Image: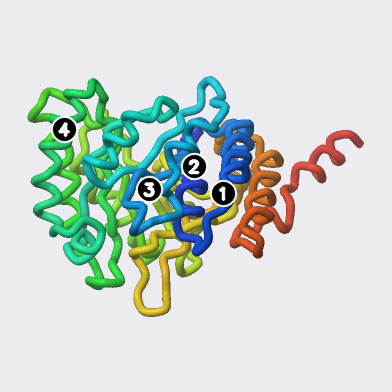
Amino acid sequence: MSDRPKKIDIREEGPREGFQIEPQIFPLEDRVRLVEALAETGLKHIQVASFVSPKRVPQMADSEQFFAALRKKPGVHYTGLWLNEAGFFRAQACPNVDLTGRISLYASDAFARQNNGCGAEEMLDKQAAWMDLYDKAGIAVEAAMVMAAFGCNKEGPIAPQKVVRMARAAVELCTSRGKILPKLYLADTMGWANPDQIRRLVGLVRAELPAETALGLHLHDTRGLGLANVAAALDMGVALFDSSVAGLGGCPFAGHGDSRAAGNVCTEDLVFLCEELGIETGVDLDALIGCARLAERIIGRPLNGRLMKAGSLNAYRRAEAAE
């Protein structure tokens, strides 16, 4: 039995995911052009840049200028990423950033230490202080994310019980303050998930969530199972997905040896899959394919998206309807 949603909601992360991992720094006007083009496709959530250490991620050193240069489209949220208080204060001081509070949790202790210099349990303990900071700033917590929920290149397989514990802790943290956690995302940060794992972990975590908390997925296509995992999640009723135009990006600190974590599932391929299954996305697929091709021109090499090379089926269907 399929419990597919009638409509999904997409958070586009290509601009931040993509440009942060590239070895070179691309012209600001090119990055702005891509974000503004994405905003014209019907996407409602675009993660533009991250407010992180310019020494560790020099590609994101000009995030304030990036946001300031944007001509924002009404109805579209332009968000940023931060990992510590210094990054949050930078984002807060930037007028064009649409601020939303988030709870950041890790199923992998090793990856938590790599990303934040502290273990998974210590990161959990720190979230209470983040809640205080968001309350003081008048910012509502929109979502929690459990990173490396399906496996970790640095730690190996992740026990589902660890993920369930972190999901339960996020809900309890909000409940203890009289708040409802609107969304909880499970992140396959390093591309370990397969469709059976998706079904199993989605089922286990959903059983721990109140009815008001929607479950979403942040999936990477590192080992080629990204869309297969999306299909499994759709059959489980998941309706929230992070994705990346043209398959841009990846986490610069999630690789192992010569490998690196590939970008999120490709946005235009995700939209195409949903359209073929009769699931609404609110996105103009042909316009989105144009954005993917723009991203490829900016990066200057072939990118991972398939649909931007093959094209959608819309032209054939329009021709058939006209006959």
On screen, residue 273 above or below 48: below
The kind of residue on which mark 1 rests is: Val
Q: Which quarter of the picture shows residue 151?
A: bottom left
Residue 86 percent across, percent down from the top left: 24, 41
Q: Residue at coordinates 46% horizontally, 60% vertically from top-left?
A: 21
Q: Name the mark on residue 131.
A: 4
Q: Residues within 10 Å of mark 4 (few under 14, many from 20)?
A: many
Q: Residue at coordinates 88% horizontally, 34% vertically from top-left?
A: 322
On the image, numbered disc 1 is attached to which residue? 245
The kind of residue on which mark 2 rests is: Glu
N-terminal of the two: label 2 or label 4? 2
Q: Residues within 10 Å of mark 3 (few under 14, many from 20)?
A: many
Q: Name the mark on residue 12.
A: 2
Q: Distance from label 2 to label 1 (Cα)?
A: 7 Å
Question: How many discs appear?
Answer: 4
Residue 48 percent across, percent down from the top left: 47, 40
- Whether residue 160 is visible: no
**In front: label 1 or label 3:** 1
In the visual, does 259 lie left or right of 128? Answer: right
Q: Distance from label 1 to label 3 (Cα)?
A: 16 Å
The kind of residue on which mark 3 rests is: Leu
Q: Distance from label 4 to label 3 (Cα)?
A: 22 Å
**In front: label 4 or label 3:** 4
Circle 2/circle 1 CB separation < 8 Å: yes
Q: Quadrant of the C terminus?
A: top right
Q: Distance from label 4 to label 1 (Cα)?
A: 31 Å
Q: Name the mark on residue 217.
A: 3
Q: Residues within 10 Å of mark 1 (few under 14, many from 20)?
A: many
